[in-house]
Amino acid sequence: MRAPKNSTAMQELRRESEALIELRENLQHISRLSHAEQNTIEHLEDELSAGQQVAAECGNLQLQLVPGTISEGLTGWSEALTVGLAV
């Protein structure tokens, strides 16, 4: 490539070169941010999955506890109130 003889042409080439350098830096910055966002999304997806698993396990645990203990407890209170009222 031939060097321009005109000083204004040289100045224009410097401005374009500086603009390209700035553009490259901005693209690199965007790329880093995009990578960080992807890591954040993956982390949040993992947390969501773990939370759903815990919720499912808690739901199963509640289903196992509900039929016996709550009805037995209510029956005991009902009997106690009935005896108490009869006295």
Image (cartoon, rainbow, N blue to C red):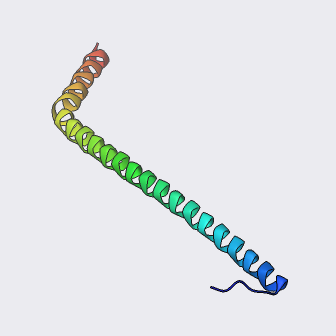
Q: Which of the 4 image quarters holds residue 86?
A: top left
| Residue drawn at 19 percent across, 27 percent down | 72
Q: Which of the 4 image quarters holds residue 76?
A: top left
Q: Which of the 4 image quarters holds residue 50?
A: top left
The percent coordinates of residue 25 (x first, y second) are: 61, 64
In the figure, 78 relative to 7: above or below?
above
The percent coordinates of residue 59 (x first, y second) are: 25, 42
Does residue 28 appear left or right of residue 6 in this picture? left
Q: Nearer the viewer, residue 69 or 58?
A: 58
Farthest residue toward the top?
87
Does residue 16 appear left or right of residue 74 in this picture? right
Q: Quadrant of the N terminus?
A: bottom right
In the figure, 64 relative to 37: above or below?
above
| Residue drawn at 26 percent across, 38 percent down | 58
Q: Quadrant of the C terminus?
A: top left
Does residue 73 appear left or right of residue 37 in this picture? left
Q: Nearer the viewer, residue 81 or 2?
A: 2
Does residue 31 appear left or right of residue 66 in this picture? right
